Image (cartoon, helix red, strand yellow):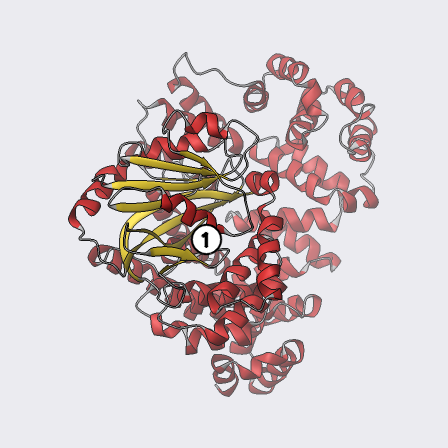
């Protein structure tokens, strides 16, 4: 008898089918494809792997189609896959060993972790996991029931299959944006759910899966309603229950329903306190209301829990690995910088980078801070200890990050280490020319990129910087007269600034505040300090000056930050973020009276900032404490029902 039959239902899957079938060809002795009406090359591709291809008329019922595929299986075990899923080549021996060691039981199926990648297909930046029972013994009456997000039962729908968790994984990309748009899965799935609701055939599990469907469609209101209905009848021992719980808590937090999210955290999620999710979620609540020390304590506890479970158990998390490391570490970095604990923030940035040395965003953040606060020899020693300069991929990553940072010496250091086979793109050459103040290379790159500059804000910025430094107003004259993605008003203003030293108008400064800040930041990073000062001074707008001051504050350039803050303070033009930065800075320095004044000013401008109330209450006099707490309750009436906030008031 064959050991394993892989059973699939497919339709128009030519883009992904080969990847799936390649991933199982070494473990499956039989592949069965049920096609529900493909009009592309799906069946042609399938024939390269199997002769067992069958047509089936789609009837809006996934269970019926699944059962049709199982009907043809002759293997001892059945593994069900979708075309947008695949197995890791590194796990082949693990799959074969597992199947060889198990004895088939008539009422037992095996639950596998599905790792879901969502977001853009290029970055696959959002990762989640879910348990799905996909492996079960053949010839024992096990079939699928429920028309969508189908479940396994024995003979009849009430006789459910018992599940055992495994450490096996399936990888899934079906909810990446391009696939969702192309196949319109949401519309297809919603038709099935609507029919089930019409027939009043929705179980607690169905409401949970409907909530997932709404969530993928960014409909948080209906997602919450569906999860709430699921929760009313959910069996807390169900494998999917923690996923429903975490999904509902997360949506409550996202929609500022913190009374409800805190209740579920303390009443339900606390039953899973051995997992990191409980502490990460608690930390998020504390952080929302400015109880930063408690939040930091929880985030560190989450990391400890994940580390401990990783050493002694197969699974270190309850529903999502990011809750055990990425989320708490990200928040520790953010809070450490906010509280002016720069060394702690850099420590956590370094820890995160060493976990994934090719994480360009983390590398950029760390090197941005180090470039402005440490010497080059120390930076090189750190990088040499953690990156292999003999490996071109490492050199290229470091080169590109320093290219973005505009660091002249470090860019050239890693450029010299690149092999002759590495050719810079025109885009990189343009930036490289600015860093090395090479007018001819810059002009050549501008010519090569002329058509792209008109629709790319980064390239437009490099054009403007070169025009400023190399005194090439004629090139800006050409681009401002052509269609540059609606940026003509800004380009005209900058042209007049360079030509006639005209002050940039308030309207332009307001409408293009982000573009002006990015331009100013780039000038500073590139070391074009005269051009930087001229831009800030001739714009002379409080939005730009606040943004520049806050940037300097974020990278620990305190003298520069304080110079801009002092200027704004004298003009009474500090914004709420600048006041907040000054408040945390003065509190960290022990100047509580000054901190109190700055916190108060920030709250005047933005009374909705609930994270500022606790810090100001902590340093206020008794009567003021009560006043600020009452203002918090006025803005957020639900806080009187959150236990830790009432403790804050009583203390």
Residue 615 screen position, x and y as percent: 53, 72
Q: Nearer the viewer, residue 538 or 390?
A: 390
Hey, which quadrant is residue 396 in on the image? top left
Rendering coords of residue 451 (x, y %): 70, 20
Splitting the image into 4 quarters, where does residue 613 fall?
bottom right
Picture coordinates of residue 312, whole percent (x, y): 20, 58
- Is residue 296 something that shows in the picture? no
| Nearer to the camera, 10 or 500 | 10
Q: Secondary structure at mark 1?
A: helix
In the figure, is residue 375 to the left or right of 515? left
Q: Residues within 10 Å of mark 1 (few under 14, many from 20)?
A: some
- Residue at the (67%, 70%) spot, across then down: 607
Pick the front one: 401 or 46 = 46
Q: Residue at x 63, y 62 (%)?
A: 579
Q: Quadrant of the N terminus?
A: top left
**Residue that mark 1 sits on:** 63
Note whether 499 is above or below 640 in the view shown: above
């Amino acid at each position: 008898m064959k050991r394993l039959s892989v059973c699939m239902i497919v339709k128009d899957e030519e883009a992904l089918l080969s990847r799936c079938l390649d991933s199982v060809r070494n473990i499956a002795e039989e592949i069965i494809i049920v096609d529900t009406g493909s009009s592309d090359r799906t069946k042609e591709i399938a024939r390269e792997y199997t002769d067992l291809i069958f047509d089936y008329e789609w009837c809006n019922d996934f269970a019926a189609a699944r059962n049709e595929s199982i009907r043809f299986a002759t293997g001892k075990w059945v593994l069900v896959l979708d075309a947008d899923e695949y197995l890791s080549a590194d796990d082949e021996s693990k799959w074969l060993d597992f199947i060889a060691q198990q004895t088939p039981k008539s009422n037992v199926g095996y639950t596998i972790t599905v790792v879901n990648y969502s977001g853009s297909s290029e970055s696959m930046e959002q990762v989640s996991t879910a348990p799905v029972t996909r492996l079960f013994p053949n010839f024992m009456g096990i079939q699928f029931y429920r028309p969508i997000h189908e479940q396994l039962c024995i003979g009849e729908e009430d006789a459910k299959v018992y599940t055992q968790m495994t450490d096996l994984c399936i990888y899934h990309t079906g909810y990446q944006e391009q696939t969702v748009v192309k196949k319109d899965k949401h519309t297809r799935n919603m038709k099935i759910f609507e029919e089930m609701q019409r027939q009043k055939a929705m179980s607690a599990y169905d409401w949970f899966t409907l909530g997932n469907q709404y969530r993928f469609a960014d409909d948080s209101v209906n997602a919450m309603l569906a999860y709430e209905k699921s929760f009313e009848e959910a069996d807390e021992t169900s494998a999917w229950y923690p996923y429903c719980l975490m999904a509902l808590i997360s949506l409550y937090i996202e929609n500022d329903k913190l009374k409800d999210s805190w209740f579920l955290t303390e009443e339900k999620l606390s039953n899973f306190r051995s997992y990191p999710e409980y502490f990460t979620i608690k930390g998020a609540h504390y952080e929302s209301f400015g109880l930063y020390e408690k939040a930091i304590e929880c985030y560190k506890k989450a990391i400890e829990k994940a580390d401990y479970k990783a050493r002694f158990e197969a699974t270190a998390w309850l529903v999502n690995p990011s809750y055990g490391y990425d989320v708490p570490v990200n928040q520790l970095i953010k809070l450490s910088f906010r509280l002016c604990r720069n060394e702690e923030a850099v420590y956590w940035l370094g820890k995160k980078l060493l976990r994934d040395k090719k994480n360009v965003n983390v590398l950029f953040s760390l090197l941005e801070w180090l470039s402005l606060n440490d010497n080059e020899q120390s930076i090189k020693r750190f990088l040499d200890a953690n990156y292999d300069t003999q490996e071109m991929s490492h050199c290229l990553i470091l080169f590109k990050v320093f290219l973005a940072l505009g660091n002249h010496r470090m860019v050239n250091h890693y450029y010299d280490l690149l092999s002759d086979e590495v050719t810079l793109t025109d885009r990189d050459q343009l930036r490289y020319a600015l860093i090395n103040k090479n007018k001819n290379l810059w002009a050549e790159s501008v010519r090569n990129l002329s058509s792209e500059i008109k629709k790319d804000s980064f390239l437009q910025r490099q054009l403007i910087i070169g025009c400023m430094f190399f005194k090439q107003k004629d090139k800006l004259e050409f681009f401002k007269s052509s269609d540059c993605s609606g940026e003509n008003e800004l380009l005209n203003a900058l042209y007049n600034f360079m030509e006639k030293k005209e002050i940039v108008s308030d309207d332009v400064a307001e409408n293009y505040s982000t573009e002006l800040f990015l331009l100013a930041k780039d000038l500073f990073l590139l070391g074009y300090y005269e051009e930087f000062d001229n831009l800030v001074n001739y714009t002379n707008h409080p939005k730009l000056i606040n943004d520049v001051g806050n940037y300097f504050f974020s990278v620990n350039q305190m003298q520069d930050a304080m110079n801009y803050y002092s200027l704004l303070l004298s003009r009474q033009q500090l914004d709420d973020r600048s006041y907040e930065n000054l408040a945390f800075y003065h509190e960290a320095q022990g100047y509580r009276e000054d901190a109190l004044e700055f916190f108060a000013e920030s709250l005047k401008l933005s009374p909705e900032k609930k994270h500022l109330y606790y810090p100001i209450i902590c340093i206020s006099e008794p009567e003021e404490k009560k006043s600020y707490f009452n203002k918090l309750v006025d803005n957020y009436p639900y806080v009187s029902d959150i236990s830790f906030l009432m403790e804050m008031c009583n203390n």
